[in-house]
Amino acid sequence: MEPHIFVDKRGIAMRETRRVTKETLMKSSKSQPRIIDADGHVRETDEEIIEFMSAGYRARRDAMLYFPLTPHHGWHRSIPANDFRQQDFRIPDWREWVAKLDEGGFELTVLYPTRLMHIGQIGNPPYAVELCRAYNDYLHQRFLIHDRRFRGMALLPLQDPQAAVKELRRAVKKYAMVGGILPAEGLSLPLGHRQFWPVFQEADKLGCALSIHSCNSLRDNDRYLLPNEAATLTHVIPQMRQFTNIMFSGVLNKLKNLRLGFLEAGCGWTPFLISKIEDRLERVAPAERPVLPHELLARKQLFFQCGEEITTKRDVELLGDDCLLWASDFPHEATRTDMKKLVKEHFARKDLSPAAKKKTIYDNAKRFYAL
């Protein structure tokens, strides 16, 4: 079927290759639950990204591609020592992703990068700006325009906060992206530092989300000895550090529209850390005290990825069920690529009530991303 044009709620024209009739939508809504995948991924390659970079970079393509466009880390994700099980490694284009949306019955998926999640490790601010702009153009052209069920999160060059503000505004207004990504690792300063506040303020004005998304970093090379040792902690510890810093910074005191998500680290760490943070904040004079985390939860401004930890039942009791998000993480989990099976497993969980399952897999993501 040939693509046709549709216009989203912001008035932005996009192409759709899969025509969905009103009757089909009504039938689907009756036969299966509504699902929003709060964190899916594209696997952008350097060869693709450089095609969206400016002429000076494209002119030296071979030299640029000899080295990775972004620094990664010393823990190769696919070595046998990391996982002996059979891998279904995928680099999905938009067509394969559409098939996965159909397979899982997803209403929407929100797409994040893979390699360029390491944007925080770029040392040169103009180069970070170039990469972010190229990635956001790539995401729009290679995915977002092809199916209305795709939503994008913009990559932001926090090395230059004013450029990050402009890029967030461009991505939201021009490409209808639903928010921006803040790297959990790599930057020389924590995210709550005042030099980054203009980015938080711009997101508040735009009414969009900001996600602190976990990733490994070069700093991990001298902290761990084994790949799975690194994988156990390299997503959780950066989130804990950034969450603590943001809570103490007071950046959210006056920003009532902003919603922050902490993704790809589960939520088991959150109640423990909130209790420690609030104990320390009680020692701060009331006139100088930042908004407490439990107040931000009540304002529905904090969201966390609902993991499969054995503590999830307790986490829901302590945090409530309005802040947890379900995510496929496709295609990153190479042993979990059957979307229908993932959805079935979610609704078969014994540690979540039926109401919590519905909120986690749909309602909360709809609120977080303002969908």
Image: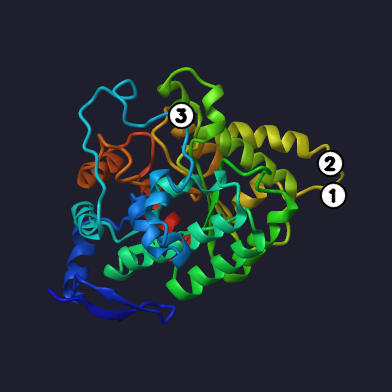
Type of amino acid under label 1: Glu
- Answer yes or no: do the residues labelled 3 and 2 have beta carbons within 8 Å? no
- Mark 3 sits on what residue? 74
Question: Which residue is depicted at the point 38% across and 39% down?
Answer: 352
Type of amino acid under label 2: Val
Where residue 190 sits in the image (x, y, percent)?
Answer: 67, 43
The image's mark for residue 220 is: none
* Cα–Cα span, label 2 and label 1: 7 Å
- Answer yes or no: do the residues labelled 3 and 1 have beta carbons within 8 Å? no
Question: Which residue is depicted at the point 72% across and 55% down?
Answer: 195
Q: Secondary structure at mark 2?
A: loop
Question: Which residue is depicted at the point 31% across and 64% down?
Answer: 142
* Cα–Cα span, label 3 and label 2: 41 Å
Quarter of the image with the N terminus is bottom left
Which residue is more in the foreground, 366 or 339?
A: 339
* Cα–Cα span, label 3 and label 1: 42 Å
Image vertical order of residue 149 relative to residue 190, above or below: below
Coloring scheme used: rainbow
Image vertical order of residue 272 relative to residue 168, above or below: above
**Which of labels 3 and 2 is toward the front?**
3
Where residue 337 sits in the image (x, y, percent)?
Answer: 24, 42
Can residue 207 be seen by looking at this rendering? Answer: no
Type of amino acid under label 3: Gly
- Mark 2 sits on what residue? 284
- Answer yes or no: do the residues labelled 2 and 1 have beta carbons within 8 Å? yes
Which residue is more in the foreground, 85 or 78?
A: 78
Can residue 65 be seen by looking at this rendering? Answer: yes
Question: Which residue is depicted at the point 41% across and 78% down?
Answer: 9
**Label 2 environment density (alpha carbons within 10 Å; few <14, some 14–19, many ≥20):** few
Taking 298 as reference, is 228 left or right?
left
- Mark 1 sits on what residue? 288
Number of on-image labels: 3
